[in-house]
Image (cartoon, coloured by chain):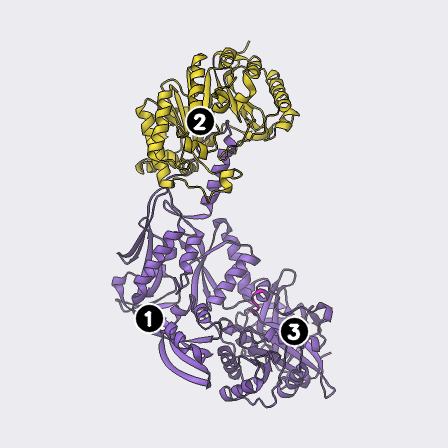
Chain colours: A purple, B yellow
């Protein structure tokens, strides 16, 4: 039986990474008795191994909770957990679109951080009611009064009644639930209108096909209805509707306006159920799809190749499956002279790239080679045309280039004031343009820089963390494209260009980078039968050079009483070793050499 | 009556009084009872085979530990061709010592006509570092006794790249070989094998580096050549006509029967070997099958160890087809790089190629 609309609260939890979002979600599940205590595990909603290991939320999760409030009424709380990292803003964005309110968690010792702010602005963009919560009051360094003042100052949110909790120990969790019920409005919902439901997530199930997670904005839907995807026009007969529970889904007769639930309809093709699309019914279609969903474009690209060419099809299948749950991932086939057949993949950022790579390797058991990440450059050619390239291989002949443009970001770094110097050094080194600096509190600053995206996609975040002992936080937004003096570096082994190692870089940095790459390759390419010249060039001009000396001795001297087996085994081993190598003409390069070039950072 | 084609016979004698720190051959301590049982085991196996042999090789271990009497007893059970080459590996410490009772004459009478002895180095400090108990004079004495017994075919083993070795000390060892009257020299580059004492203390050993070792090898090749020993295999050198016929069988992919613990066989197209356990052998445990032998890969891999190299004609005769075009292209590339030669219808490795024989052969075999 459907509950009264005014007893429904749809909300999400937003926070800077590590401020305790998933832990608070765990406590809410406990307090509402959604999970038996014996089944409780930490980070219950983060089902992916990777999420638990890294302690982060990658995917949005939804769960329906029943809460008996102090006013004696029973409420339905739909919690949509969201990721916190900047790379996953799009996940946050579509989750926000499904809610009326958001619980904003702020760490009682760390205070407002970069993503606290970024996520707050996102929530305000979606007109969400914010419920501030000061978390981690159990920490010895906690200073809830200071942090509450900070939230009021920086965000402008009244914190006088903000619950001060410890999600870890469970202190004051009821207050959070009460605030959700009191402060967050019930959904404006009309069952009689044509159906409009926002798909905020979907997963593939091998029995049920695609399971679509929706927030019903208007109208209703039940099994037997014909659902229509408004963007693609695809239609399916609804098989099941239901609610997400903490552990098992709970089927229901129908989903009505204001509710959050799932729909299955034997949807086979993943591309038919795009996250962000609006579901309506064929019987009584809505005229307009829902607004508010922000389409995201990949900002970082790289080539992903199977280490073993035979895995190409498996890689394609894996990417297809991942894309189902990850609208921001794009891929298209590409070929590399060096690496064979693979895919050019687009990501939101480097963390997103790493996560996808790790999921491909773990969940799909694939051995991969990835190329150096690239951003999207705009190149103005002599004939007046402009091309966009996300792959250095497509970089045109410099003679035909009038100018190049690269994406810039508006970046905010939040840090204790002590680290201002080292942060500015880092940003300066990354070609940053200083904009301004605000003191949030006497000892915390917000440093605003304009940074080229290609300077932050490699290891900016890692460098920042190590320079500030983990205290700085960072958020960025793409701002615009700017003219820049870019060049393409080519790596030549034995005189042949290795396409997979080419990349685009600012000309000022070309020489030092080229030298480092050459050295790194020299260290990582084992001696072979012949001398191997390593050259780094721009166009036809070589700007750095190293040589891998020829190996001189690899011989099995003795014949042990006709023991041919031993010799054969040795040859087999040698052949196996060769298999793990990438072959470029006559040169063999181990995977580690690619990685070594890829991982070049400041400290090298 | 059909002619039986003679094959080689290898007898493994897995007994040593001590273990050399670089050696990972299988050996056990020679207590009388075990030795006697082992010899009986060998004879049982020999008697069971209805074959004729044109080479016999007592390898070890230390075959000379058996003593001439037991060797004669074994030899008497082996059906041999008239000109059968019969080699006995000897340790200078038990055959060259002043008070040694080893009877080379009796051995010669039983049919032994070739002796292979481990010199390793003619410099006593180097010998000591290798854990060799005998001195240089023991080797000299043994060689003298061998010649006096009427055995003219003597081979000495040298080791390259050993602790303390320099080009000068190596030259001394080579001179020793040449002036000793030996007609054959095997020169092996020291390889630190797992499970040896050298392996345990590999980080403390002061060894010539890779480049120096390569130079030592090249020096050995040219110096022995100048003294009349021509190279016929990666590690083997001989005066004209004194190549080891038994070992050539391995490299030419011809058949041989191996009897004894850890002995390997290639008979009737099949490879098999006995486990590394003397007790098992004595108790009659059967050899382990190791699949078909004599395939193209094997043939090429082994032929390329020889100076005579891989003959296009022999390959074609044996396998009924020509070497693939891909193989020839790869070979041409390696010739261009100075690692291979081609002459008179045969591909062979150069000296530099020998030093890189593992990767070179691997490259070529992939083209078959």
Q: Is residue A474 magenta?
A: no
Q: Which mark is residue A205?
A: none
**Numbered disc 2: secondary structure:** loop
Q: Chain of mark 2?
A: B
Alpha-carbon neighbours of circle 3 within 10 Å: few (<14), some, or many (≥20)?
many
Let me know if marks 3 and 1 both belong to one chain. Answer: yes
Give percent across and percent down for residue A113. Answer: 50, 79
Kindly indicate whether the residues beneath marks 2 and 3 are on one polypeptide chain: no
Q: Can residue A150 be seen here?
A: yes
In this view, the mark in front (1 or 2): 2
The span picked out in magenta is A53-57
Question: Does B193 appear above or below A112?
Answer: above
Label 2: which residue? Answer: B135
Work out whether B239 lies above or below A491. above
Which residue occupies the foreground of this view, A112 or A342?
A: A112
Q: Secondary structure at mark 1?
A: strand
Residue B328 appears in the rendering:
no
> Mark on residue A405?
1
Describe the element under mark 3 as helix, strand or loop: helix
* Horizontal side, residue A588 vs residue A275: left or right: left
């Amino acid at each position: 039986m459907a509950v009264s609309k005014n007893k429904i609260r749809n909300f999400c939890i937003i926070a800077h990474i590590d401020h305790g979002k998933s832990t608070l979600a765990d406590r809410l599940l406990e307090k509402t008795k959604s999970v038996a205590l014996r089944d409780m595990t930490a980070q219950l909603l983060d089902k992916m191994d990777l999420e638990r290991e890294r302690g982060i939320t990658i995917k949005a999760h939804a769960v329906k909770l029943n809460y008996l409030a102090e006013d004696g009424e029973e409420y339905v709380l739909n919690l949509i957990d969201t990721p916190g990292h900047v790379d996953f803003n799009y996940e946050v964005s579509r989750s926000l679109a499904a809610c009326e309110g958001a619980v904003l968690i702020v760490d009682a010792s760390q205070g407002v951080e970069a993503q606290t702010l970024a996520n707050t602005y996102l929530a305000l963009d979606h007109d969400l009611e914010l419920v501030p919560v000061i978390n981690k009051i159990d920490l010895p360094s906690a200073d809830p009064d200071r942090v509450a003042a900070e939230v009021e100052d920086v965000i402008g949110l009244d914190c006088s009644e903000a619950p001060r909790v410890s999600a870890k120990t469970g202190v004051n969790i009821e207050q959070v639930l009460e605030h959700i019920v009191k402060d967050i409005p019930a959904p404006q919902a009309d069952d009689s209108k044509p159906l409009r439901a926002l798909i905020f997530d979907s997963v593939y199930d091998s029995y049920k096909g695609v399971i679509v997670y929706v927030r019903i904005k208007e109208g209703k839907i039940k099994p037997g209805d014909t659902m229509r995807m408004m963007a693609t026009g695809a239609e399916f007969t609804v098989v099941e509707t239901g609610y997400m529970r903490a552990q098992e889904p709970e089927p229901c007769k129908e989903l009505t306006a204001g509710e959050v639930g799932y729909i299955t309809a034997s949807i086979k093709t993943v591309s038919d159920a795009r996250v962000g699309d609006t579901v309506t019914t064929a019987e009584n279609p809505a005229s307009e799809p829902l607004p508010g969903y922000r389409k995201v474009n990949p900002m970082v690209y790289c080539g992903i190749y199977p280490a073993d060419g035979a895995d190409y099809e498996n890689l394609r299948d894996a990417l297809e499956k991942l894309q189902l749950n990850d609208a921001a991932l794009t891929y298209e086939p590409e070929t590399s002279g060096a690496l064979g057949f693979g895919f050019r993949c687009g990501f939101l950022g480097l963390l997103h790239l790493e996560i996808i790579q790790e999921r491909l390797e773990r969940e799909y058991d694939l051995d991969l080679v990835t190329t150096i990440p690239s951003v999207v450059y705009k190149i103005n050619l002599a004939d007046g045309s402009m091309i966009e390239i996300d792959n250095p291989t497509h970089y045109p002949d410099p003679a035909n280039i009038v100018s190049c443009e690269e994406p810039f970001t508006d970046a905010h770094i939040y840090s204790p004031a002590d680290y201002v110097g080292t942060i500015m050094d880092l940003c300066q080194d990354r070609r940053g343009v200083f904009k301004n600096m605000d003191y949030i509190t006497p000892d915390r600053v917000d440093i605003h820089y304009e940074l080229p995206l290609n300077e932050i996609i490699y290891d900016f975040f890692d460098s920042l963390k190590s320079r500030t002992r983990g205290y700085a936080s960072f958020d960025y937004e793409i701002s615009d494209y700017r003219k820049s003096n870019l060049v393409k570096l080519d790596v030549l082994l034995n005189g042949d260009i290795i396409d997979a190692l080419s990349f685009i870089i600012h000309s000022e940095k070309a020489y030092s980078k080229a030298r480092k790459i050459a050295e790194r390759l020299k260290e990582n390419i084992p001696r072979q039968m012949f001398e191997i010249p390593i050259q780094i060039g721009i166009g036809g001009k070589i700007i750095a050079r190293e040589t891998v000396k020829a190996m001189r001795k690899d011989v099995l001297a003795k014949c042990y009483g006709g023991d041919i087996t031993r010799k054969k085994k040795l040859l087999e081993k040698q052949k196996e070793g060769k298999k793990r190598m990438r072959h470029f003409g006559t040169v063999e390069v181990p995977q580690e050499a690619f990685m070594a070039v890829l991982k070049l950072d400041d400290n090298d | 009556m059909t002619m039986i084609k003679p094959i080689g016979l290898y007898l493994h004698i897995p007994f040593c009084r001590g273990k050399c720190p670089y050696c990972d051959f299988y050996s056990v301590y020679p207590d009388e009872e075990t030795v006697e049982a082992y010899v009986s085991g060998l004879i049982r196996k020999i008697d069971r085979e209805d074959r004729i042999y044109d080479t016999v090789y007592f390898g070890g271990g230390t075959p000379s530990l058996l003593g001439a009497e037991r060797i004669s007893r074994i030899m008497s059970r082996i059906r041999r061709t008239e000109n059968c080459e019969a080699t006995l590996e000897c340790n200078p410490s038990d055959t060259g010592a002043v008070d040694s009772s080893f009877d080379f004459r009796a051995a010669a009478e039983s049919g032994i006509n070739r002796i292979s002895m481990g010199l390793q180095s003619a410099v006593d400090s180097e010998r000591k570092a290798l854990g060799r108990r005998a001195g240089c004079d023991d080797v000299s004495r043994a060689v003298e006794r061998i010649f006096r017994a009427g055995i003219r075919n003597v081979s000495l083993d040298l080791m390259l790249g050993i602790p303390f070795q320099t080009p000068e000390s190596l030259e001394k060892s080579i001179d020793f070989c040449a002036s000793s009257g030996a007609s054959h020299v095997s020169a092996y580059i020291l390889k630190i094998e797992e499970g040896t004492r050298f392996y345990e203390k590999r980080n403390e050993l002061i060894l010539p580096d890779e480049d120096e070792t390569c130079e030592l090898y090249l020096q050995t090749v040219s110096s022995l050549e100048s003294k009349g020993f021509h190279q016929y295999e990666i590690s083997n050198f001989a005066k004209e006509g004194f190549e080891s016929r038994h070992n050539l069988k391995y490299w030419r992919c011809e058949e041989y029967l191996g009897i004894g613990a850890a002995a390997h066989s290639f008979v009737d197209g099949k490879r098999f070997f006995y486990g590394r356990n003397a007790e098992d052998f004595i108790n009659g445990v059967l050899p382990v099958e190791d699949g078909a032998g004599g395939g193209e890969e094997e043939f090429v891999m082994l032929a390329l160890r020889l100076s005579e190299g891989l003959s296009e004609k022999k390959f074609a005769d044996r396998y009924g087809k020509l070497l693939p075009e891909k193989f020839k292209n790869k070979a041409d590339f390696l010739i261009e790089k100075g690692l291979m030669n081609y002459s008179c219808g045969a591909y062979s490795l150069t000296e530099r190629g020998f030093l890189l024989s593992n990767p070179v052969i691997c490259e070529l075999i992939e083209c078959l």
